Amino acid sequence: MAQALVSMRHRLRFAAVDAIAGLLEGVRARGAFLLRTVLDPPWAMRIEDEAPLTLAAALRGGAWIVPEVGPAVALAPGDVALVVGPGHYVVADEPGTEPTVVIHPGQVCTTLSGEELVLSRSLGTRTWGTAADGSTALLTGTYEGRSEVSRRLLDALPHVVVVRAGEGDPALVELLAAEVARDEPGQEAVLDRLLDLVLISVVRRWLAGAGDAAPAWWRADLDPVVGPALRLLHEDPAHAWTIAELARAVGVSRAAFARRFSEVVGEPPIAFLTGWRLALAADLLREPGTTIGSVARQVGYGSPFALSAAFKRVYGVSPHQHRSVAS
């Protein structure tokens, strides 16, 4: 018993994965699409790429994001916006400007009549637009991969999140903008990591100022009882956690812990753990070379059959079916 308690205290002390880190891990860029756009008004682009998440920064001049539902949002120089997909929207110099360009899935760009527009290098690496010195310069980074882990984060965000100039980290945006224009070995990995850093900065700023609009898991991570328990669950989902063990680890009674966790998170501890394990499994199943057995072991299921039964109960398809659709 004493050894088990020491082990729990060790995990509690050195748990390194907080709620936001675990959720952002699911939206890490992997070959993200990045583009610098330079334009003179009037201009407007209809975005129909159905990407799960797009980051847009106004480097010079201004822009408007006009969603299909909800008010238009203005971007001033230095502002950074996150647009949560897959809904369509328009980016324009003014809300009333009619689009002349459509961005389709796979970042295929066409005119309204369907004529494909090819990215030219005449304006620079990863740069497109109407003039090199256009009055508007935008930086866009698009996450095209989907993740069940990140769904908890994306579902919590409004369709458009904006961090205004002066509230965020302009140095990160400036560094990303500079790197977008470079074409060197390993540049894709550099851009992916920089885009992730900008994303994390924007999400943290929004969460910190969201107040009651912040999701329950964010408020829970700050709770002195629930927060440490969440970090344990995120760090080691394969462990055979019990409510009694978690309660001992955070120093409260079993009943008090179960009650507090349900109040703050909105679901019981074991239900939360099950959802977290299956979300991790859904993402791991997309990785090449994984087997259902190896995924089951990584997320705390004793056999492929046990994982398959739980997975189908929650997602409505078997792990094999999920993998075939994802690929």
Image (cartoon, rainbow, N blue to C red):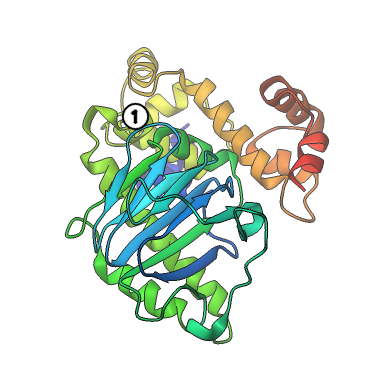
The residue nearer to you, when weighing 291 against 159, is: 159
Vertical side of 110 occupied by 211: above or below: above
Q: In the visual, does 313 lie left or right of 218?
A: right
Residue 301: where, in percent of width, then height?
Answer: 70, 32
The residue nearer to you, when weighing 272 against 169, is: 169
State which quadrant residue 184 falls in: bottom right
The residue nearer to you, when weighing 310 against 207, is: 207
Vertical side of 57 occupied by 104: above or below: above
How dense is the environment of label 1, judged by Cα within 10 Å: few (below 14), some, or many (20 and up)? Answer: many
Q: Which residue is mark 1?
A: 226
Q: In the visual, does 79 lie left or right of 131?
A: left
Residue 25: where, in percent of width, then height?
Answer: 50, 51
Amino acid type of the residue tagged 1 in the rendering: Val
Residue 33: where, in percent of width, then height?
Answer: 55, 64
State which quadrant residue 20 falls in: top left
Vertical side of 97 occupied by 241: above or below: above
The residue nearer to you, when weighing 174 against 252, is: 174
Q: In the visual, does 278 lie left or right of 81?
A: right
Residue 124 can be seen in this image = no
Quick one: SS at disc 1?
helix
Residue at image position (40%, 81%) is 132
Residue at image position (69%, 26%) is 315
How many marks the image carries: the answer is 1
Vertical side of 80 occupied by 265: above or below: above
State which quadrant residue 118 falls in: bottom right
Residue 78: where, in percent of width, then height?
Answer: 24, 63
Residue at image position (52%, 76%) is 126
Residue 172 can be seen in this image = yes
